Image (cartoon, helix red, strand yellow):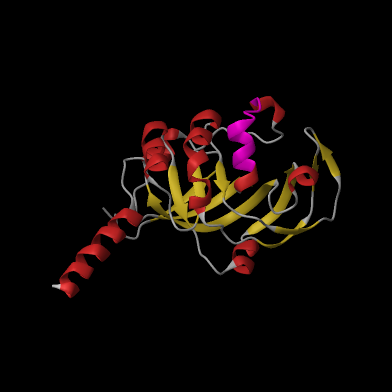
Amino acid sequence: MVNGSSVRRLKTPLTKDDALSLKTGDVVLISGRIVTGRDRVHQFLFHERPDKREIPFDLEGGIIYHCGPIITPSLALPLKGGGVGGGKLIAAGPTTSMRVEMYEADVIKSYGIRGIIGKGGMGDKTLTALKEYGCVYLHTISGAAAYLADRIKGVAGGWKIEEFGEPEAMWLLDVEDFPAMVTMDAHGNSLHKEIERLSFERLKEMMA
């Protein structure tokens, strides 16, 4: 069910109550810090299961952005775990989220994630985890990498850059009013599934 067009301002880290207060259809503006994570990060977290103390960024209550940013380094500040801080972000568009469907539920459970940002939605396994652990999926604008990069005010650090490569590394980003819409909530609702259902019904009507 779509909740309409209410706009919510969120500040990271998020609490479980924050996640539970959101419904599909809510537009959110996120400020604070988020981390990026694409295929390689999810594979590493799933298979290697590093202790939270090994990760230079606190993921508890955090938001993972499915994104492979383009960053021009301007500083080289060492962080634990072999990371560096600093850099200018040039582009930061979302990656298709279904690429990490097989890992996401476990990552949510193991690292206390409260929000996922990406495009295209995710599957039933992730939807179940969102409800079980109190997390939301947030769909952001596709094809607007430069616009979204402008909502990112700084690069606070990076991790696994040399090992994974720049797009696949985990980056810690400072964001301000980063726009997204809740399309999968912590109550078992999925706007993606609803659109699929309505589209199928419309197709049947056209074929009748």
How far across and down, in percent of the image, does residue 140 sit? 49, 59
Q: Residue at 64% across / 42% down in the picture?
A: 41
Decide if residue 37 is in sight here.
Answer: no
Residue range corresponding to the magenta coloring: 41-51
How far across and down, in percent of the image, does residue 190 sit? 33, 50
Q: Quadrant of residue 202?
A: bottom left
Q: Quadrant of residue 13?
A: top right
How far across and down, in percent of the image, does residue 102 sit? 49, 41
The residue lying furthest to the left in this view is 208
Q: Quadrant of residue 176?
A: bottom right
Lateral position of residue 102 relative to residue 91, left or right: left
Q: Residue at 79% across / 50% down in the picture?
A: 86
Magenta stretch encompasses residue 4? no
How far across and down, in percent of the image, does residue 198 sit? 24, 62
Instruction: Decide which of 20, 107 is in the foreground and name it.
Output: 107
Lateral position of residue 18 relative to residue 35, left or right: left
Q: Residue at 23% across / 69% down in the picture?
A: 203
Q: Quadrant of the C terminus?
A: bottom left
